Image: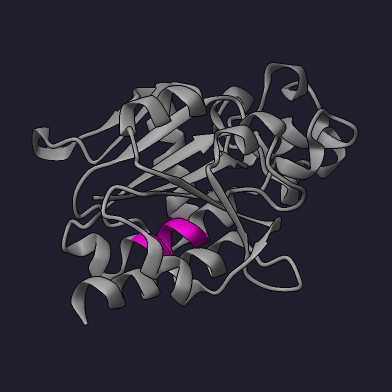
Amino acid sequence: MISLVLSESSLELVPYELQDHPSVISHARKLGKHPSEILLDNSWHFAAMRGIENEMKRGRPDLVHFSILEATTIPLYLKNKIKIYIHTLDDKVIYFGQNVHIPKSYHRFEGVIEKLYQDKKIMPNNEVLLEIKEKTFSELLDEINPSKVIGFSTKGKPGSYEKIADKMSDDSCIVVGGFQKGHFSNFIENKITEMYSVGDESFEGHVVVARLLYECEKTIFM
Protein backbone atom coordinates (compact mmCIF):
# COMPACT_ATOMS: atom_id res chain seq x y z
CA MET A 1 0.00 0.00 0.00
CA ILE A 2 1.28 3.49 -0.88
CA SER A 3 2.01 5.79 2.06
CA LEU A 4 1.78 9.58 2.07
CA VAL A 5 3.62 11.57 4.74
CA LEU A 6 3.20 15.31 5.16
CA SER A 7 6.56 15.93 6.77
CA GLU A 8 7.63 18.72 9.14
CA SER A 9 4.06 19.92 9.00
CA SER A 10 3.11 23.36 10.26
CA LEU A 11 0.74 21.96 12.87
CA GLU A 12 1.26 22.44 16.59
CA LEU A 13 -0.35 23.84 19.70
CA VAL A 14 0.88 27.25 20.86
CA PRO A 15 4.24 26.53 22.56
CA TYR A 16 4.71 27.43 26.21
CA GLU A 17 7.03 30.36 25.50
CA LEU A 18 4.35 32.15 23.43
CA GLN A 19 1.31 31.52 25.62
CA ASP A 20 1.63 34.81 27.53
CA HIS A 21 1.79 36.98 24.41
CA PRO A 22 -1.17 39.40 24.14
CA SER A 23 -2.12 38.21 20.64
CA VAL A 24 -2.30 34.60 21.83
CA ILE A 25 -4.21 35.44 25.00
CA SER A 26 -6.71 37.56 23.05
CA HIS A 27 -7.31 34.86 20.45
CA ALA A 28 -7.67 32.10 23.05
CA ARG A 29 -10.16 34.22 25.00
CA LYS A 30 -12.30 34.63 21.86
CA LEU A 31 -12.32 30.86 21.44
CA GLY A 32 -13.07 30.25 25.11
CA LYS A 33 -9.93 28.17 25.53
CA HIS A 34 -6.60 28.30 27.34
CA PRO A 35 -3.66 29.44 25.16
CA SER A 36 -2.12 25.96 25.52
CA GLU A 37 -5.20 24.39 23.89
CA ILE A 38 -5.21 26.25 20.55
CA LEU A 39 -3.26 25.77 17.33
CA LEU A 40 -0.41 28.12 16.53
CA ASP A 41 -1.69 30.19 13.62
CA ASN A 42 0.25 32.91 11.85
CA SER A 43 -3.00 34.67 10.92
CA TRP A 44 -3.66 35.40 14.59
CA HIS A 45 -0.27 35.06 16.26
CA PHE A 46 2.05 36.82 13.81
CA ALA A 47 3.35 39.27 16.41
CA ALA A 48 4.03 36.48 18.91
CA MET A 49 5.81 34.33 16.32
CA ARG A 50 8.23 36.99 15.10
CA GLY A 51 11.78 35.68 15.41
CA ILE A 52 10.98 32.21 16.76
CA GLU A 53 12.97 29.19 15.60
CA ASN A 54 11.88 27.88 12.18
CA GLU A 55 9.47 30.80 11.88
CA MET A 56 8.77 30.27 8.17
CA LYS A 57 7.81 26.63 8.71
CA ARG A 58 5.35 27.27 11.53
CA GLY A 59 1.87 28.64 12.09
CA ARG A 60 0.15 27.47 8.89
CA PRO A 61 -2.25 24.66 9.85
CA ASP A 62 -4.50 25.75 6.97
CA LEU A 63 -1.92 24.41 4.49
CA VAL A 64 -2.02 21.03 6.20
CA HIS A 65 -5.83 21.13 5.99
CA PHE A 66 -5.69 21.73 2.21
CA SER A 67 -3.37 18.77 1.63
CA ILE A 68 -5.36 16.40 3.82
CA LEU A 69 -8.60 17.34 2.06
CA GLU A 70 -6.97 16.55 -1.29
CA ALA A 71 -5.74 13.18 -0.05
CA THR A 72 -8.87 11.96 1.76
CA THR A 73 -11.54 12.79 -0.83
CA ILE A 74 -10.22 10.73 -3.74
CA PRO A 75 -10.75 7.10 -4.85
CA LEU A 76 -7.20 6.12 -3.83
CA TYR A 77 -8.07 6.76 -0.18
CA LEU A 78 -11.75 5.82 -0.29
CA LYS A 79 -10.79 2.41 -1.72
CA ASN A 80 -8.12 1.90 0.95
CA LYS A 81 -5.13 2.04 -1.40
CA ILE A 82 -3.16 4.63 0.57
CA LYS A 83 -2.17 5.28 4.19
CA ILE A 84 -1.86 8.91 5.32
CA TYR A 85 0.30 10.36 8.06
CA ILE A 86 1.02 13.89 9.29
CA HIS A 87 4.50 14.27 10.75
CA THR A 88 4.85 17.59 12.57
CA LEU A 89 7.83 19.86 12.96
CA ASP A 90 7.98 19.02 16.68
CA ASP A 91 8.02 15.25 16.01
CA LYS A 92 4.48 14.09 16.48
CA VAL A 93 2.66 11.83 14.04
CA ILE A 94 -1.06 11.83 13.30
CA TYR A 95 -2.43 8.54 11.98
CA PHE A 96 -5.53 8.33 9.79
CA GLY A 97 -7.94 5.43 9.92
CA GLN A 98 -10.11 4.30 7.01
CA ASN A 99 -12.81 6.53 5.53
CA VAL A 100 -12.04 9.51 7.74
CA HIS A 101 -14.13 12.49 6.64
CA ILE A 102 -12.09 15.59 7.36
CA PRO A 103 -14.23 18.73 7.85
CA LYS A 104 -14.12 20.96 4.79
CA SER A 105 -14.51 23.99 7.03
CA TYR A 106 -11.10 25.02 8.38
CA HIS A 107 -12.61 26.12 11.70
CA ARG A 108 -14.14 22.69 12.25
CA PHE A 109 -10.87 21.04 11.23
CA GLU A 110 -9.08 23.26 13.76
CA GLY A 111 -11.47 22.10 16.48
CA VAL A 112 -10.97 18.43 15.60
CA ILE A 113 -7.18 18.72 15.72
CA GLU A 114 -7.24 20.63 19.01
CA LYS A 115 -9.45 17.88 20.47
CA LEU A 116 -7.06 15.26 19.10
CA TYR A 117 -4.13 16.91 20.86
CA GLN A 118 -6.10 16.85 24.09
CA ASP A 119 -7.59 13.33 23.88
CA LYS A 120 -4.85 11.63 21.77
CA LYS A 121 -7.52 9.70 19.84
CA ILE A 122 -10.72 10.49 17.96
CA MET A 123 -12.79 7.32 18.10
CA PRO A 124 -16.56 7.50 17.77
CA ASN A 125 -18.24 4.07 18.06
CA ASN A 126 -14.93 2.58 19.33
CA GLU A 127 -13.33 2.98 15.89
CA VAL A 128 -10.08 4.94 15.84
CA LEU A 129 -10.33 7.59 13.12
CA LEU A 130 -7.40 9.78 14.18
CA GLU A 131 -4.58 9.16 16.62
CA ILE A 132 -1.55 11.25 17.58
CA LYS A 133 1.72 9.86 18.93
CA GLU A 134 5.14 11.19 19.86
CA LYS A 135 7.27 9.90 16.99
CA THR A 136 10.15 11.08 14.83
CA PHE A 137 10.18 10.92 11.04
CA SER A 138 12.83 8.20 11.22
CA GLU A 139 10.72 6.11 13.60
CA LEU A 140 7.72 6.50 11.32
CA LEU A 141 9.70 5.30 8.31
CA ASP A 142 10.90 2.29 10.31
CA GLU A 143 7.26 1.49 11.03
CA ILE A 144 6.11 1.94 7.41
CA ASN A 145 9.18 0.12 6.06
CA PRO A 146 8.79 1.32 2.44
CA SER A 147 10.78 0.02 -0.51
CA LYS A 148 11.62 3.62 -1.49
CA VAL A 149 11.03 7.09 -0.07
CA ILE A 150 10.11 9.67 -2.71
CA GLY A 151 10.35 13.34 -1.80
CA PHE A 152 9.47 16.57 -3.59
CA SER A 153 11.59 19.70 -3.52
CA THR A 154 12.93 22.34 -5.89
CA LYS A 155 16.33 20.88 -4.97
CA GLY A 156 15.42 17.52 -6.54
CA LYS A 157 16.04 16.20 -10.04
CA PRO A 158 13.48 17.20 -12.68
CA GLY A 159 10.60 14.81 -13.22
CA SER A 160 6.95 14.70 -14.24
CA TYR A 161 4.12 13.48 -12.03
CA GLU A 162 3.20 10.85 -14.60
CA LYS A 163 6.70 9.35 -14.86
CA ILE A 164 7.25 9.43 -11.11
CA ALA A 165 3.96 7.66 -10.43
CA ASP A 166 4.73 5.09 -13.12
CA LYS A 167 8.00 4.15 -11.36
CA MET A 168 6.40 3.78 -7.93
CA SER A 169 5.85 0.38 -6.35
CA ASP A 170 2.88 -0.49 -4.13
CA ASP A 171 4.95 -0.03 -0.95
CA SER A 172 6.50 3.34 -1.82
CA CYS A 173 6.34 6.26 0.60
CA ILE A 174 5.62 9.75 -0.74
CA VAL A 175 6.97 12.65 1.33
CA VAL A 176 5.62 16.17 0.81
CA GLY A 177 6.48 19.18 2.95
CA GLY A 178 3.65 20.35 5.17
CA PHE A 179 5.07 23.84 5.59
CA GLN A 180 4.85 27.20 3.83
CA LYS A 181 8.41 28.01 2.77
CA GLY A 182 11.88 26.54 2.81
CA HIS A 183 13.24 23.05 2.36
CA PHE A 184 13.26 19.81 4.27
CA SER A 185 15.75 19.71 7.12
CA ASN A 186 18.97 17.83 6.41
CA PHE A 187 17.75 14.98 8.61
CA ILE A 188 14.61 14.51 6.48
CA GLU A 189 16.53 14.89 3.21
CA ASN A 190 18.94 12.13 4.25
CA LYS A 191 16.03 9.73 4.69
CA ILE A 192 14.64 10.35 1.19
CA THR A 193 15.95 7.92 -1.41
CA GLU A 194 14.62 9.77 -4.49
CA MET A 195 14.08 13.54 -4.56
CA TYR A 196 12.21 15.15 -7.45
CA SER A 197 11.40 18.64 -8.66
CA VAL A 198 8.18 18.94 -10.63
CA GLY A 199 8.52 22.47 -11.95
CA ASP A 200 10.63 25.59 -12.19
CA GLU A 201 8.86 27.16 -9.23
CA SER A 202 7.82 26.09 -5.75
CA PHE A 203 4.30 24.68 -5.48
CA GLU A 204 2.24 24.43 -2.31
CA GLY A 205 2.02 20.93 -0.87
CA HIS A 206 -1.65 20.40 -1.69
CA VAL A 207 -0.96 20.97 -5.39
CA VAL A 208 1.76 18.30 -5.40
CA VAL A 209 -0.44 15.91 -3.42
CA ALA A 210 -3.42 16.34 -5.76
CA ARG A 211 -1.47 15.95 -8.99
CA LEU A 212 0.73 13.05 -7.91
CA LEU A 213 -2.08 11.04 -6.34
CA TYR A 214 -4.18 11.45 -9.47
CA GLU A 215 -1.33 9.95 -11.50
CA CYS A 216 -1.09 7.13 -8.96
CA GLU A 217 -4.79 6.45 -9.40
CA LYS A 218 -4.33 6.17 -13.16
CA THR A 219 -1.76 3.39 -12.66
CA ILE A 220 -4.13 1.48 -10.35
CA PHE A 221 -7.67 2.08 -11.62
CA MET A 222 -7.31 2.98 -15.32
- Nearer to me, 222 or 133: 222
For the image, the number of numbered tags is 0
Which residue, as the protein is rendered here, is positioned at the far bottom? Answer: 222
Image check: 88 left or right of 165? right
Quarter of the view holding residue 46 = top right
Residue 67 part of the magenta segment = yes
Residue 78 part of the magenta segment = no
Image check: 101 left or right of 183? left
Quarter of the view holding residue 203 = bottom right
Magenta segment: 66-71
Does residue 168 appear in the picture of this structure? yes
Q: Is the magenta stretch mostly helix, strand or loop?
A: helix
Q: Where is residue 38 in the image (x, y as percent from the top left)?
A: 57, 34
Instruction: Say above or below: 88 vs 74.
Output: above
Image check: 112 left or right of 62? left
Does residue 104 appear in the picture of this structure? no
Q: In which quarter of the image is the C terminus?
A: bottom left
The residue under the point 82% across, 35% down is 49
Q: Position of residue 106 (x, y in %)?
A: 50, 58
The residue under the point 73% across, 51% down is 43
Q: Position of residue 165 (x, y in %)?
A: 40, 67
Q: Position of residue 71 (x, y in %)?
A: 38, 61
- Nearer to me, 132 or 116: 132
